[in-house]
Amino acid sequence: MPEDEDMLIPVPGIDNLTYEDANILLRFQRLWIELILWMRNFFHSALENLPDLATVTARVFQQMPQDFFNEFSKYFGPEESQRFLNLFSRLVAINWQLVNAYKENNQAAIDESTVLWYRAADEIADFLAGVNQYWDEDEIRTVLHKYIQLKIAEIIAFLNNDYDQELQIFNELEGLVTRMAASLAMGIIARRPQRLEPPFQAQKRQ
């Protein structure tokens, strides 16, 4: 987890969190942490032809989008939720294409997949900003672009057998997605009509 940084993104009008608010925050952070963990497992298995590849692939590209969809659908209608699932599934699937392109050392496929990945990030940023006024399109796009940059750097470090660098990049990814998850969760919390449970004061990391 990131250190020496605030774990909550302030939202005007929210001075404290209820128990349900805190659960939303924790669920969002858990999902994003699981995503980067399983993504890392996937490219390790794919690039090294490990026997768990089929199991890891199913976890990343089938179960993870469904997990995100299940959480998203708690706060939005069926049409919006399905649209999110489609966009998120594409965002994740392009990572698969990119890893295979690196595995085959196909520079043209690497370039094409990279362009498609950034485009998918832009589309999901535009969509999210459109369904929640508390989600900022530019902020989400910037974070997702940074996420893509770090994922690519992580893969390259692994291919170069630079495992210290790979771990350092993963730690940076962990901090990035934890903060992004907090920002998205606070956007959900801000649009809730009321919070009925006894609040507790949001804490900052020491």
Image (spheres, helix red, strand yellow):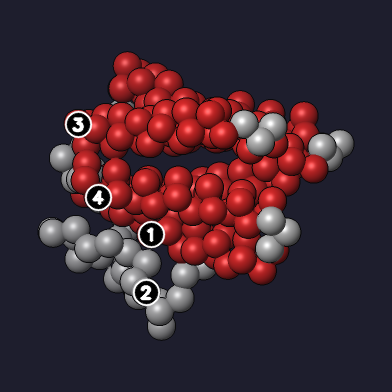
The numbered mark at residue 147 is: none
Q: Which amino acid does label 3 sit on?
A: Gly
Circle 1 crowding by C-alpha within 10 Å: few under 14, some 14–19, many from 20: many
Residue 78 relative to residue 154: left or right: left
Residue identifier under label 2? 5
Which residue is at the far bottom? 206
**CA gap, disc 2 and disc 3:** 28 Å
Q: Position of residue 48 (x, y in %)?
A: 80, 43
Q: Are marks 4 and 3 in contact (CB under 8 Å)?
A: no
Q: Earlier in the sequence, mark 2 or mark 3?
A: 2
**CA gap, disc 4 and disc 3:** 13 Å
Which residue is at the far right? 51
Q: Is residue 9 above or below residue 107?
A: below
Q: Are marks 1 and 2 in contact (CB under 8 Å)?
A: yes
**CA gap, disc 1 and disc 3:** 21 Å
**CA gap, disc 1 and disc 2:** 9 Å
Q: Which amino acid does label 4 sit on?
A: Glu
Circle 4 crowding by C-alpha within 10 Å: few under 14, some 14–19, many from 20: some
Q: Where is residue 12 in the image (x, y as percent from the top left)?
A: 13, 59
Residue identifier under label 1? 179
Q: Which of marks 4 and 1 is nearer the N terminus?
A: 4
Residue 128 relative to residue 110: left or right: left
Q: Which residue is drawn at 32% across and 16% down?
A: 79
Residue identifier under label 4? 139
Q: Where is residue 26 in the image (x, y as percent from the top left)?
A: 46, 55
**CA gap, disc 4 and disc 2:** 17 Å
- Write down the quadrant of residue 43 in the picture: top right
Q: Are marks 2 and 3 in contact (CB under 8 Å)?
A: no
